[in-house]
Image (spheres, rainbow, N blue to C red):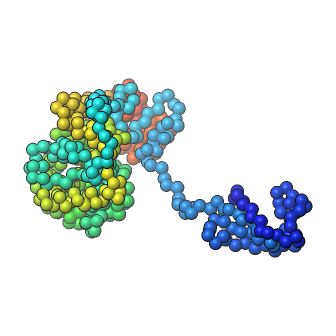
């Protein structure tokens, strides 16, 4: 209902109002003429004139009326649905966040200690430079490439602190859009849901290369190689450095070598998304092996990092974008342009999480403790994976091969379930997951493995 504002002009006696003219809030408009006009300075105000009496009506029409409702996020929306479910056996296997065996959020002990040390030091809260905390940028590049790597010593890496993995990928996408106008990004099919959003938002064209083979619930390596070969020369090939999201399927070391051969032959640029270093296998070095192999070949490389998973700094938004260049001069120029992109986007990054990372990596005792906690988290997920496989194998009498569960790595498992089967998982079993069949084993406990196995077996055989 539009609200009304009344404005009475100075009326002649013949146009004056009496108690008979105003009755129950209505005007008696006998012997008056009616006209409408927009107020000159306000498009939302209309003036209605009745002889010498004018009435100004305010209309509640929004300037933003043409903006449509955005669809809910397919991953974060899973958690909202989970919260609304009151079933006692419900499981949230949608969001990729680590949980304890009691399915509670986990703050690393080493992070608590680093937090306490920062509080004791009384660090200020001044703005960071656009490129971020210098100490963080040094340790994050050292962790990814190795402190003794020639590209580090020769200052051939442009490192800029970003807003976790998402923000770091977005900076790189903006760099591609600005300086590679004909550049195209190839992403795996399937991939993390936000990859497409990031490149769409940056107006960078993308296409897909084959990755997942539904017949084997494994890697379609031949299709992957064929599509990378067929891509226009100089394309950016987005690769998951370890623990592929959503499939959990990684190439073998031998396959990584072949992938690097093809990328080099086609003069493509490898673009790594490193979201799980140390969290996949429990080893920082093992999980960085693919990136280091490409760099060792002398290739220029882009690599985005995140500390959400391996340090549990989800809300701190800590990550980095690294660009390995062929010369120190090129690295300096790339860094200057990354800073130029970041300045109008968010000005400078947050300091607290960056200090946590720098202090943990820079302290031998804290660094050792962090490695132990990463091994513990990765180990718990491996135990859950094995228990789920054992439960599926013992309960399902159909002869189906569930070994793909063991062949996958990291916090996710790609079940191979289709949308109808996933709907059965949620509607009947109260198991919340993304509709592509991905489940987060980090949100599963050993105690819940048999229940989940029952849900998967039923949905696989009957959910279609």
Identified at 35% across, 28% down, the residue is 100
Drawn side of residue 42 relative to residue 440, left or right = right
Above or below for 263 versus 376: below
Place of residue 250 in the rendered image (x, y in percent of width and height, measured from the top left)? 23, 45
Drawn side of residue 280 relative to residue 96, left or right = left
Place of residue 388 in the rendered image (x, y in percent of width and height, measured from the top left)? 33, 31
Drawn side of residue 356 relative to residue 464, left or right = left
Q: Nearer the viewer, residue 46 or 461?
A: 46
Q: Quadrant of the N terminus?
A: bottom right
Above or below for 339 versus 318: below
Place of residue 442 in the rendered image (x, y in percent of width and height, measured from the top left)? 34, 34
Identified at 27% across, 62% down, the residue is 176
Q: Quadrant of the C terminus?
A: top left
| Residue 82 in view of the camera | yes
- Give the image quarter of residue 208: bottom left
Q: Nearer the viewer, residue 243 or 353?
A: 353
Farthest residue, direction right: 20
Q: Nearer the viewer, residue 10 or 376?
A: 10
Place of residue 294 in the rendered image (x, y in percent of width and height, measured from the top left)? 15, 52
Q: Nearer the viewer, residue 60 or 226?
A: 60
Identified at 66% across, 70% down, the residue is 39
Identified at 17% across, 58% down, the residue is 332
Above or below for 287 versus 90: below
């Amino acid at each position: 209902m539009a609200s009304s504002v009344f404005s009475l002009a100075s009326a002649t006696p013949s146009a004056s109002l009496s108690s008979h003219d105003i009755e129950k809030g209505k005007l008696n408009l006998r012997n008056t003429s009616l006209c409408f006009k927009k107020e000159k300075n306000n498009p939302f105000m209309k003036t209605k004139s009745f002889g010498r009496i004018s009435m100004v009506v305010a209309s509640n029409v929004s300037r933003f009326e043409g903006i449509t409702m955005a669809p809910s996020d397919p991953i974060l929306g899973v958690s909202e649905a989970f919260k609304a479910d009151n079933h006692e056996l419900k499981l949230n296997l949608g969001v990729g966040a680590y949980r304890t065996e009691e399915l509670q959020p986990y703050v690393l002990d080493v992070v608590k200690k680093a937090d306490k040390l920062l509080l004791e030091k009384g660090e200020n809260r001044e703005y960071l430079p656009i490129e971020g905390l210098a100490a963080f940028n040094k340790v994050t590049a050292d962790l990814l490439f190795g402190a003794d790597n020639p590209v580090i010593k020769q200052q051939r890496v442009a490192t800029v602190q970003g807003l976790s993995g998402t923000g770091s990928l977005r900076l790189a996408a903006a760099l591609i859009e600005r300086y590679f106008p004909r550049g195209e990004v190839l992403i795996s099919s399937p991939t993390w849901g936000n990859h497409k959003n990031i490149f769409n938002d940056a107006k960078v064209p993308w296409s897909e290369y084959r990755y997942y083979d539904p017949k084997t619930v494994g890697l379609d390596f031949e299709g992957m190689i064929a599509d990378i070969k067929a891509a226009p020369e100089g394309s950016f090939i987005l690769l998951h450095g370890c623990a592929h999201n959503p499939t959990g399927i990684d190439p073998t070391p031998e396959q990584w070598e072949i992938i690097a051969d093809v990328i080099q032959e086609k003069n493509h640029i490898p673009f790594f998304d490193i979201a799980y270093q140390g969290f996949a296998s429990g080893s920082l070095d093992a999980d960085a092996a693919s990136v280091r192999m490409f760099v060792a070949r002398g290739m220029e490389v882009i690599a985005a990092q995140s500390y959400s998973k391996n340090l549990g700094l989800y809300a701190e938004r800590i990550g980095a974008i690294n660009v390995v260049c062929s010369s120190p001069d090129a690295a300096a120029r790339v860094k200057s342009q990354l800073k130029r992109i970041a300045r109008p986007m968010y000005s400078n990054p947050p300091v607290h999480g960056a200090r946590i990372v720098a202090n943990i990596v820079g302290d031998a005792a804290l660094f050792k403790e962090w490695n132990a906690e990463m091994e513990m988290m990765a180990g718990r997920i491996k135990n859950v994976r094995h228990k789920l496989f054992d439960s599926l194998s013992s309960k399902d009498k159909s002869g189906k091969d569930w070994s793909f569960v063991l062949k996958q790595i990291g916090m996710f498992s790609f079940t191979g379930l289709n949308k109808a089967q996933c709907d059965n998982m949620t509607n009947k079993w109260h198991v919340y997951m993304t509709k592509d069949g991905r489940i987060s084993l980090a949100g599963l406990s050993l105690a819940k493995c048999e229940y989940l196995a029952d849900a998967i077996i039923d949905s696989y055989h009957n959910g279609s």
